[in-house]
Amino acid sequence: MTASAKALFVHLLTASGAVFAMLAMLAAVDQKWDLMFLWLVVAFIVDGIDGPLARRYRVDRHAPQFDGQLLDLIVDYLTYVFIPAYALFKSDLLPGWTGWVGIIVITFASAMYFADTRMKTKDKSFSGFPSCWNMVVLVMFAVTPGFWTILAVVTVLAVLMFVPVKFVHPVRTHRWRRATLPVAIVWTACAGLAAAQDFDVAAPVQMVLIVTSAYLMVAGALQQMIYGPNG
């Protein structure tokens, strides 16, 4: 296979996330939340592997007719933001007016964040919360906290999108990657298990989701505190 063909295949792999997004949306419309999140987990896995493949096969050089970063952002907005926000709105997790607040805050703030040219730091981390609402909402489905707690989490994370606090990328952030990548894999496995069980999960699985989510949320800020903002 030629270098151009390999690079094009990577673009096609990234674009497949849009198909998984559509399958997730169709499941969400029918309120089949377990199936919706299973498709989102599949999209999450694709998003985790297409970046390394893109860098390995130099898609910018061998398939420059397609903008891989733009393609990735389009798919990410669907799978990380739009569909999870819809699920939060249509489920009973945020009833009444709180659901409207949730979807407006999530979709509007995330659109601005995705267009922010400062979203990446020098060490390949994210500056501000990287709009990973698919992860947040899945944990909410699995743990089912009260709506005031969910609304508070949504509000705080929306604000944190535009605060210069680091959030690690499980693959690209080199520092602590030996810990971060396994944590992300464990989170993904537990997320898939929770969705497969229609979120009727045992307390240990809930606890693992909470602990791994907490690590992924605070690891970047801890690095920032230890090594400084430019470390």
Image: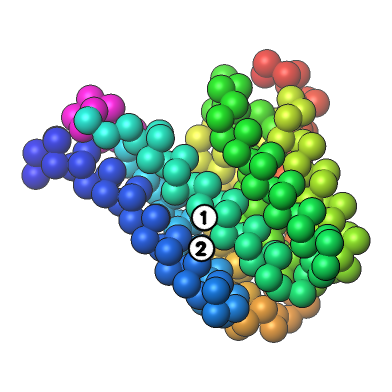
Q: Is residue 64 left or right of residue 37?
A: left
- Above or below, 127 against 210 in this view is above
The answer to if 59 sits in the magenta stretch is yes
- Above or below, 161 against 209 in this view is above
Residue at the (71%, 73%) spot, across then down? 91
Quadrant containing the C terminus is top right
Pointer 2 or 1: first along the chain: 2
Q: Is residue 104 left or right of residue 179?
A: right
Quadrant for residue 149, please give it: bottom right
Residue 74 place in picture, x, y as percent: 45, 43
> Is residue 200 in view?
yes
What segment carries the magenta color? 55-64
| Residue closest to the eye, 112 or 200 | 112
Residue at the (74%, 46%) spot, across then down? 105
**Marks 2/1: CA–CA distance:** 6 Å
The amino acid on which the numbered mark 2 sits, given as a three-letter code, is Leu
> Is residue 176 in view?
no
Q: Is residue 53 left or right of residue 122?
A: left
Residue at the (34%, 36%) spot, across then down? 68
Residue at the (33%, 56%) spot, across then down? 16
Mark 2 vs 1: CB contact within 8 A: yes
Which residue, given by chain and number where applicable, does mark 2 sit on?
40
The amino acid on which the numbered mark 1 sits, given as a three-letter code, is Thr
- Within-10-Å neighbours for mark 1: few <14, some 14–19, many 20+: many
Q: Is residue 8 left or right of residue 185?
A: left
SS assignment for the magenta stretch, majority: helix
Badge 2 element: helix
Residue 9 place in picture, x, y as percent: 22, 47
Residue 155 place in picture, x, y as percent: 82, 46
Which residue, given by chain and number where applicable, does mark 1 sit on?
79
Badge 1 element: helix
- Within-10-Å neighbours for mark 2: few <14, some 14–19, many 20+: many
